[in-house]
Amino acid sequence: MRTFLIKVIFFSSLLLAIVIGCATRVPEFEKENFIGSIVEKHKRLDSISGPRLLLAGGSNVAFGVNSKSVEDSFHLPVVNMSLHAGLGLDFVLGELKATVRKGDVVLLVPEYFAGEGRSVLKELAAYYYAPSESYTIPTFEEQLDKYLDGTMSRIKSNKENLIKYLRERARGKKDERPVYNRYSFNEYGDMVAHLNEKKLEILKDGDAMEYQHWDGIAKINAFAAYCKAKDVKLMFTYPTYAASCYEKNKPVIAQYHSDIVKEMHIPVVGVPADFVYPDEEYYDTVYHLRKDAREKRTAKLIALLKEQQVLMN
Amino acid sequence: MLFNSFGFALFLPIVFMLYWFIANRHFRIQNIVLLLASYLFYGLWDYRFLFLLTFSILLDYYTGIRIHEAATPAKKKTWLFISISINLGFLFFFKYYNFFAESFAELLTSAGFHPDIWTLKIILPVGISFYTFHGLSYVIDIYKDRTTPTKNFVDYALFVSFFPLLVAGPIERATHLLPQVQAPREFELNKAVDGLRQILWGLFKKIVLADGCAKFANLIFASSDTVNGSTLVIGAVLFAFQIYGDFSGYSDIALGTARLFGFELLKNFSYPYFSRDIAEFWRRWHISLSSWFKDYVYIPLGGSRKGRNRAIINTFIIFLLSGFWHGANWTFIVWGGLNAIYFLPLLLSNRNRSNMEIVAEGRMLPTFRELFAMIFTFAQVVFAWIFFRADNLSHAFRYISRMCTTLFHKPDIFPVTTFAIIAIFLVIEWLGRESPYAIAKIGIRIPTPARWSFYLLLILTMIALHEKNQQFIYFQF
């Protein structure tokens, strides 16, 4: 037994040392991470002194709205704050809470059944933009997960970056900048690098949904009360979604919509079907619109917002 | 608690220490520790189902004694009937009620009626199919005088609920595991190290092979109406490796974990994708379930001893039951039926036991004939997996139809890394196919520094390729 324990302890220590070594964050590797664009988004937020129109949600908004058109239509500076659905609804609401001020208008566009998000992405956001650490209060489990998932993710990221670095050294030239990059956004915070890219053969995130009552409704209602107290206008609308998946998940989405209409205490702009486009109009996931449909969606959104008249006062 | 979770990485060493250091004065105290640990392990899924598990244990413990003590064969039979009825009643209710209710409603609707059938929101208790079968084998073995009932409740409860096998098998037999529970266990260094090595290999199969394949298999099955035929073939092949890595990986972890506590569980997989015909495949795939059906259904029905027609019927019965055991969906039943159809020609031509030994035993490479036979068998198995994986029968038929009509188009995706992993995995499995699990002999043949480097490489590959929150497929059964 003694020999066994000594062997196990020695092997575990060796493993731990290697894991810690491999998981060390290499700043050089992290310079252009997609999540890093949170810094530029907050710079724009801070640079506008008057009321703003804030677009918040996951990557469906980052990839699929032309903020300039919205700004031109309503004569209100637009900031597209959206980044990644994996940051979770709590993060989005926490970020808004720390950001909104009197006179702002917020349009929330979370992905269907947006959940709590992944702690590793939140940790990454905090690495670039320290104030974001306070957007959510992690539970003990999330804290633990942050270290475990974070360690594993850093090893993965270091591995990929090391391969890229070696490839670039061998070729003697830099790789083309990938779409998922910190500098793929325009001044409004819209992702633009993908607009002219071809559709990938298979769109990701197209799994069948399972209905469950969405706890996001209660969270958004709580945030609505906060907005009311601060004289901030809050609205909700639906994400864009590829037609094939919309058809597949129609009954679940109908129930989701019905719950929202019944229970949400803020104006709801449009219905899910308003933002459904053929699969060919998407880039890599069922939420990421390409150029033409992005314009259509923006036009639809502007028309629906005009109908709401919230922005016309 | 998942085997591939941080929680289990904490749980296992704690139970190990308690078992060998605190409770080592007597094996009965060790049994209590293992029983409590098993209840904790199971209760962390859903504590409410502990009552069901306990009821099932009490039922079979009590009826086992009553069967043994019954004065007449009729009384024995009555107690056996009570036990089987209640066990299968629970299994039916939790697993199949909605299936039958919905199928009945569909039948009536197609006949022009408009029935108002009640379906219930039933949560399937994890592992119910496995522990029900443990209990059934126990009472049937007592009835058949293959074993005697234990009077020690803890021993019996541990036999049913031993945490490594509680939620996804292997399906143990009282004649095999119970005597181990009832005897003292000695710590053996080689056995414990071997257990850890098997756990490592199981985790590698699950995290690297199964989860790596799952990512693309799920994508392709979800997009099966839009991608071309060659992509669908890739999807089916990837699912074949996903389910193998997932389930055999789980079994390896279970066997390795049990070995850490001094127990030997039944082997559940034996390199099934190197089978040369479908009969051999079924001797190597989910062995504990196949042998359960053989011993408790096929042979009591007469097996192949009562003529050709009866053998055909019995074969269909066990394959259909095996499909139905997996879940309340017609896809599983068709999957079982298809395997029966594959099996029948072998049975009828008395060739179902022609490949009993390990393929290319003692040789490095198979002959062309063996290679062709393995590829043909694998193709049959992959085709049947399409039904197993599809959401419903209509999905499966659409999948196959599209696969056939656009087969020779260029694949929409070809996951090179995943196929490279599959290739490396197959080489390791081929080299280790004469051992209980593929890397078992590494402990004997390779010097320590190289061996440890290999283990570290496996672990780092797992970390670098892991996908978060991946369940084991067989937990749903």
Image (cartoon, rainbow, N blue to C red):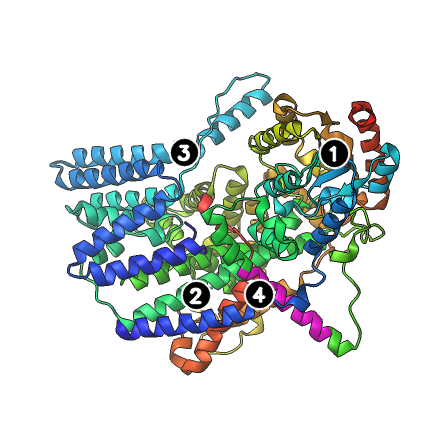
Q: Nearer the viewer, mark 1 or mark 2?
A: 1
Q: Residue at x 50, y 53 (%)?
A: A145
Does label 1 lie on the same chain as label 3? Answer: no
CA neighbours of label 1 inside 10 A, class few (<14), some (14 to 19), many (20+): many
Of B20 and A81, nearer the camera is: A81
Quadrant in which the N terminus of chain A appears: bottom left
Residue hosting label 4? A155
Q: Secondary structure at mark 2?
A: helix
**Disc 3 marks which residue?**
B94
Stretch of the chain drawn in magenta:
A151-167
Q: Chain of mark 3?
A: B
Are the two marked residues, 1 and 2, in contact with CB atoms closer than 8 angstroms?
no
Q: Nearer the viewer, mark 1 or mark 4?
A: 1
Q: Which mark is residue A104?
A: 1
Which residue is most to the left?
B71
Q: Chain of mark 4?
A: A
Which quarter of the figure has residue B182? bottom left
